[in-house]
Amino acid sequence: MAGQDPFTLFDTWFAEAREQEINDSNAMALATADAEGRPSVRMVLLKGHGPDGFVFYTNRESRKASELAENRDVALLFHWKSLRRQIRIEGTVGLATDAESDAYFATRSRDSQLGAWASDQSRALDARETFEARFEAMKARFEGGDVPRPPHWGGYRVTPRVIEFWQDRAHRLHERRVFTRTDDGWTEGTLFP
């Protein structure tokens, strides 16, 4: 597989993961850091990818959004245990367009759309009943019509500068291929396990 474009290799591995992984083959860990460099990590779902980057969606008033605004350097990690593979991505994050965010939001289930309106993601919640009441209020508010995308909800795109493909091998003799973005495209190398 030498000399491949990292996105072609990602597409191959991701297609295999979608066939093999039982749940959430598109789950990826998103690592951020605030302005002081304090790290945080959580799982998000990949909703689009290509040579321009890797896209996920969230509440833009959440803790992660605040950290993304303070420090654009991020890392992603896909771990597919059943395939004994992982992909590490390091890069910078930017906003997806409103058109992209609107298009994706329209594909979500109605309850997920309503939940985006009802949730003050990452803020303190006094009781589960408060959230459930807000969800019911959103159901009533949008009854009989489409649910528009909330203005505080949208996508982010991670533009990679490094992509590493890790394959488990017997006796911890793993295979690690790393692609690094340059002005002329991508360079490829290997790393000791």
Image: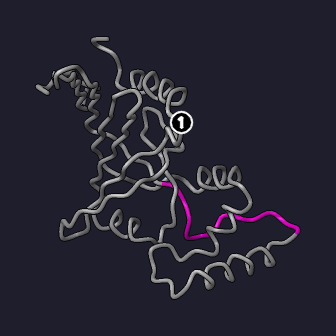
Residue 150 is one of the magenta-drawn residues: yes
Picture colour scheme: one colour
Which residue does the image show at 55% across and 70% down from the upper left?
152
Q: Overall secondary structure of the magenta stretch?
A: loop
Q: Residue furthest front?
A: 171
Q: Quadrant of residue 67?
A: bottom left
The percent coordinates of residue 181 (x first, y second) are 25, 32
Q: Residues within 10 Å of mark 1 (few under 14, many from 20)?
A: few
Residue 107 is one of the magenta-drawn residues: no
The percent coordinates of residue 139 (x first, y second) are 77, 73
The percent coordinates of residue 90 (x first, y second) are 27, 43
Q: Which residue corresponds to mark 1?
A: 22
Q: Residue furthest bottom?
A: 126
Which residue does the image show at 51% across and 66% down from the upper left?
59
- Say above or below: 12 vs 50: above
Give the number of marks. Answer: 1
Residue sitting nearer the eye, 95 or 150:
150
Q: In the rendered view, does 11 fall on the left or right side of 37? A: right
Residue sitting nearer the eye, 44 or 66:
44
The percent coordinates of residue 13 (x first, y second) are 42, 25
Give the quarter of the figure containing the C terminus: top left
Disc 1 residue type?
Ile
Q: Quadrant of residue 81?
A: top left
- Say above or below: 21 vs 129: above
Query: From which residue to which does the magenta span run?
Result: 144-155
- Say above or below: 119 vs 170: below
- Say above or below: 3 vs 91: above
Give the quarter of the figure containing the N terminus: top left
Which residue does the image show at 11% across and 25% down from the upper left?
192
Residue sitting nearer the eye, 80 or 139:
80
Q: Residue furthest left?
A: 192
Q: SS for tag 1?
A: loop
